[in-house]
Structures are given as C-alpha cells and as structure tokens.
C-alpha cells in the first residue's frame, strides 16, 4: 500500500514524533533525498519540536541497516509503510537511549509508539507494534562487534552496505575502516566561517548586526584557523547573521581546495561546478579584488532544485570582486560560451570541485550510502577525468588548477589525477601538492585536493 493511502484516512498528526514517522514512511516508500524531504517540514513545526523531528528522521536513516536487520528477524511479513515507520522511529529511540540510566525508558518508548500507531495506522496494528518494539530492545542494545568480524556483520551493525565496507577494508585496513564507520554514525557538529563585514547592511537588517567586528560568543574557536563551531540550541541567534551573510555554514574540509588555490588580489579566477557557491564566496573573500567567474549546469526543468538559487544568493553577497555567473555544461565548448558572455577564455587559477561519490561526507549526507552502487566507482572517475581535461583548457600558462572531491576513495582522487597527468592534456601540468583528508585522522569531513601548475 502506498504511504499516501496508508496515512490519508487519519487526520494529520501534529508534533515532532508523528511528523517524523510520516516523513520516514515517505522515505521507505519513495527513497526521496533526505535534504529534500526535510525541506517539506511544515513551518508550524518550529523551535525544539522541529529540531527533535529532524533528529528522529536523521537518526532512523543513519541507523536504517541495523534497525532493519533486527526487524527482519522479528517480523515475517513487513507491515504497511505507516506501521513500519513507527517501528523504525521507535527503533532509533531505543538506540538513542542506550546507556540511559532510566530503567523505565524502554517501557516509555513502547507505550509512546503504541499510542502513536493508533492514529498513524490503526488500533490493530498498535498491538503488533507493542509486541515487536518490546522484543526490539534486546538486539538493538548489543555492543559493537569486534574488529575480527565479517564485512556483513560490520555493515549491519554500523548501517553501511557490505560491499562498501569491503571496498574500505581493502583500501584502509580493518582499524581505519572501523574508525570511519563509527565516524559516519555520529551526528556532525555545525561549523561556520565568520565573514568580513559587507560595506552596507542588507535591506531590513540593523547595522549593529552587520558591523560586529568579532564573532559572537556562541561561535566556539576550533583547531582550524578561521573555522568556528556553532553551539547547539543557538539557532535563533545564528539566523540573523546567516541572513546578513556574516556567518556561512561550512565544514573545515571545504577550505582545503581554496587554501591550495591560494587566490591573490587582482587575479582572474574561475570556479567550475560552483553551486551552491560556498567555495566561490570563500575565494572572493580571500582575493578581495579581481574577477571571479562561477560556472554550473543550467537548471533542469524536469528536475528543478535550489542549487542555482543558492549560488546566486551567495554570489550576491560578494563585495569588491567582479562576479559573473555562467550556467553551462563544462563539457561543451566552454571557450565559445565564455566568449559569448564576454569573459576571458583563460584564468590565473581554476577550481574544479568535481561531482563524486560523497564518501567523505557521509556524516552529513547520511542517505548517500543507501543510494551508492558499486558501479559508481567506475562511472564517477570517467566523468571526473573528462571534467579535468575541460578545466585544464581554461588555465593560462603558469596558472594553477586545483582538482578536488569530497570522496575518500583513491579511484576518484589519485587515480583521476594520475590518468590526467599521463594524458596529452595533462602534459603541460605538474603536480605541486596533494592533500588527502581521512575523517578518522583529520577530525573533519573527508576530501581529496590536488594543486596542478601549468608550465610556461
């Protein structure tokens, strides 16, 4: 039964828990992207209730494999999506409550799930939920397996596909793979960059917010220069600074390619695959004067999304730098496209932050692991190499080209760069520096970044 049919007979339930269950029912049925799914949260769900709902939804998807494995052993015939969603949300609550000293915590979770099922599904299904959730507590309270277990067991407990665990075991070994799996299962802190003050406040913004010289107290210093951690529970204080552009939420790993690029005042720089624009904004803040061209694919009318809108918004926050946005396919004739826009055909510095598997950012993009397929690790490098060849044509003699991904897999990083340097297009380039970020070692998202120089 479709989730729409399953839930349409009941009034729309209010509050964090039932809203989370409805979203999980949709995800189980359609496997929508989680960021898009959370964008559908009603505006009436605000503050702590909204945060609680997001916590439940993200928790279920993060631990989906472990909960599903436990449920499969307890339920021979999966119930309809509305009831399954209740079981998954209750299952995550049991995981979330592990180590809680409240002896009655399990009973409270069971009772609450049963009561919610009566309105989300039916009284008859509430009896099933009562029986299953009581039995679910034991398998979900088991400790993590030791290192000497099969990839299937590691994948089940840490909720990753077994084939992906095998890939990582072959690349990184058992200890690093275990550390990576544990890393991906922990909710990510929120990091931010404190930006220079714009010349004048945005419409409707008080000057006091814009002109504050120092970061506010709710931004905690980190081990990474220029990166701050946003303390939890401070969203109402963060929001005004987000609106003025003083704060930009950004993981420390995203600074690496821009640091390698080392933008200089007065340079001409092009950022390829630029959306949503965080790196373009950082480039402009670093160079302060010069020209910045941001390139990304045009909006697909069949699959519209917010990426270009977010890119335009970020570019609008840039001051002091001449900015141009080009919506085009890099694999087409970029020289002709740039001429059409009356823009240079070559640049002092080129950034290519290529589309990739996202294996380095699974702590943030928690549903990626359920969408990846083994064939992606052949498909992505082919596309990345084509993009790198196209990017190389835009580098002026003596100029810099940074290739980066948010992947931790060698095929998408070292493998692509090695193939490029061995090709005719890569002949004029030398590799000057490589930075690989492995989350369990660096303490932030994973990434690969490579600085290439075009010889005169």
Image (cartoon, rainbow, N blue to C red):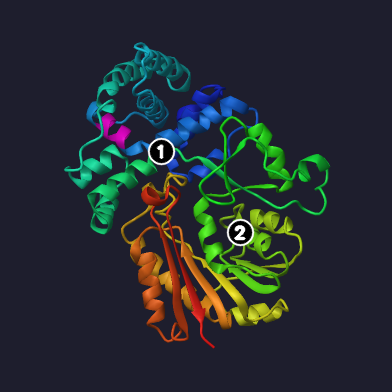
In the picture, the quarter occupied by the C terminus is bottom right
Q: Is residue 375 depicted above or below 159 in this figure? A: below
**Dominant secondary-structure state across the stretch colored magenta:** helix
In the picture, the quarter occupied by the N terminus is top left
Q: In which quarter of the image is residue 77?
A: top left
Q: Can residue 1 be seen in this view?
A: no
User: Percent x, y for residue 90?
Assistant: 39, 24
User: Percent x, y for residue 100?
Assistant: 37, 19
Name the residue rendered at 53%, 74% in the picture. 401
Q: Which residues are drawn in magenta?
A: 66-72
Q: Is residue 426 depicted above or below 94 in this figure? A: below
User: Percent x, y for residue 200?
Assistant: 83, 51
Q: Is mark 1 on a helix, strand or loop?
A: loop
In the displayed structure, does residue 199 sit left or right of residue 97? Answer: right
Task: Looking at this view, name the residue that lies furthest to the top.
Answer: 104
Q: In which quarter of the image is residue 318?
A: bottom right
Mark 2 — residue?
Answer: 301
Q: Quadrant of residue 431?
A: bottom left
Mark 1 — residue?
Answer: 186
Q: Is residue 254 depicted above or below 149 in this figure? A: below
The CA distance from mark 1 to mark 2 is: 36 Å
Q: Is mark 2 on a helix, strand or loop?
A: loop
């Amino acid at each position: 039964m479709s989730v729409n049919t399953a839930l349409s007979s009941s009034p729309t339930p209010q509050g964090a828990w039932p809203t989370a269950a409805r979203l999980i029912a949709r995800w189980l049925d359609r496997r929508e992207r989680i960021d898009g799914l959370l964008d559908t949260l009603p505006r009436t769900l605000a503050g702590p209730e909204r945060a609680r709902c997001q916590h439940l939804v993200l928790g279920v998807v993060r631990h989906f494999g472990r909960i599903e494995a436990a449920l499969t052993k307890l339920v021979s015939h999966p119930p309809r999506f509305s009831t399954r969603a209740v079981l998954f949300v209750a299952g995550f609550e049991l995981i979330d409550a592990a180590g809680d000293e409240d002896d009655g915590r399990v009973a409270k979770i069971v009772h609450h799930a049963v009561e919610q099922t009566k309105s989300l599904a039916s009284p008859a299904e509430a009896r099933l939920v009562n029986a299953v959730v009581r039995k679910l507590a034991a398998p979900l309270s088991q400790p993590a397996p030791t290192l000497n277990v099969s990839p299937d067991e590691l994948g089940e407990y840490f909720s990753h596909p077994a084939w992906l665990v095998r890939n990582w075991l072959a690349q990184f070994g058992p200890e690093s793979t275990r550390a990576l799996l544990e890393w991906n299962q922990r909710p990510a802190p929120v990091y931010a960059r404190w930006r220079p003050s714009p010349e004048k406040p945005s419409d409707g913004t008080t000057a006091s917010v814009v002109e504050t010289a120092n970061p506010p107290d709710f931004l905690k210093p980190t081990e990474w220069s220029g990166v701050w951690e946003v303390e939890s529970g401070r969203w109402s204080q963060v929001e005004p600074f987000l609106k003025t552009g003083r704060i930009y939420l950004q993981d420390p790993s995203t600074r690496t390619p821009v640091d390698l690029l080392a933008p200089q005042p007065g340079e001409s720089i092009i950022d390829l695959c630029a959306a949503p624009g965080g790196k373009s904004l950082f480039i402009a803040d670093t160079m302060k004067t010069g020209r910045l061209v941001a390139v990304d694919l045009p909006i697909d009318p069949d699959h519209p999304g917010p990426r270009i809108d977010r890119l335009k918004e970020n570019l609008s926050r840039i001051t002091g730098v001449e900015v141009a946005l080009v919506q085009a396919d890099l694999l087409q004739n970029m020289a002709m496209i740039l001429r059409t826009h009356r823009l240079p055909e070559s640049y002092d510095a080129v950034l290519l932050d290529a589309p990739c598997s996202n294996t380095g950012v699974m702590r943030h993009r928690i549903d990626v692991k359920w969408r990846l397929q083994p064939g992606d690790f052949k498909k992505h490098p082919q596309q990345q190499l084509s993009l790198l060849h196209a990017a190389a044509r835009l580098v002026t003699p003596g100029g810099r080209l940074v290739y980066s991904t948010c992947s931790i897999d060698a095929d998408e990083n070292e493998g692509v760069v090695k193939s490029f340097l061995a090709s005719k297009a890569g002949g004029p380039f030398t590799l000057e520096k490589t930075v690989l970020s492995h989350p369990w070692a660096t303490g932030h998202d994973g990434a690969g970044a490579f600085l290439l120089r075009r010889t005169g």
